[in-house]
Amino acid sequence: MPEYKTLLKFSRPEYVKDLSVSRSQDQGLLKVWLQVSKKDSEETIELSGFEDLAEAVSSLIQAERAVISKEANSGKDFGTIKIECWVDECFSEYTCDTAE
């Protein structure tokens, strides 16, 4: 079973304060910039990937809880970022390629 390092996590009353999305027309690569408002601070992360990331966007906005983590020591180039979201007691998991 792969090991993961947590990059960003939040739960209510923390929330997604800002979300920007851009898509590269020639490759279809999606970039998502996410800013989370926490008690006394804000955290940001930029994700990039393809279709699975597009599906994750609405879940991230609605999430009561979310965890974004990176697969450690995988040796893979793609799909190493895991996005877990809990919305209305339902769990969803998505992947993308990079997180900064």
Image: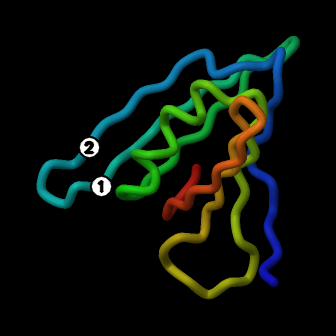
Question: Which residue occupies 60% across, 70% down?
Answer: 80
Query: With respect to residue 43, does 56 lie above or below?
Result: below
Query: With respect to residue 27, does 36 lie above or below?
Result: above
Q: Which residue is at the front of the view, 61 or 33? A: 61
Q: Which mark is residue 56?
A: none
Q: CA distance from mark 1 to mark 2?
A: 6 Å
At label 2, the amino acid type is Arg
At label 1, the amino acid type is Leu
Do residues under tags 1 and 2 come within 8 Å of each other at their CB atoms? yes
Question: Which residue occupies 44% across, 46% down?
Answer: 55
Q: Quadrant of the N terminus?
A: bottom right
> What element does badge 1 sit on?
loop
Q: Residues within 10 Å of mark 2 (few under 14, many from 20)?
A: some
In the picture, measured across the screen, residue 12 lies left or right of residue 34, that is right
In percent of width and height, residue 64 lies at 76, 27
Q: Which residue is mark 1?
A: 29
Residue 73, quarter of picture: bottom right
In percent of width and height, residue 98 lies at 52, 60
In the picture, measured across the screen, residue 43 lies left or right of residue 59, that is right
Residue 81, quarter of picture: bottom right
In the picture, measured across the screen, residue 21 lies left or right of residue 85, that is left
Question: Which residue occupies 80% across, 32% down?
Answer: 10
> What element does badge 2 sit on?
strand
Question: Which residue occupies 50% across, 79% down?
Answer: 77
Q: Which residue is mark 2?
A: 23
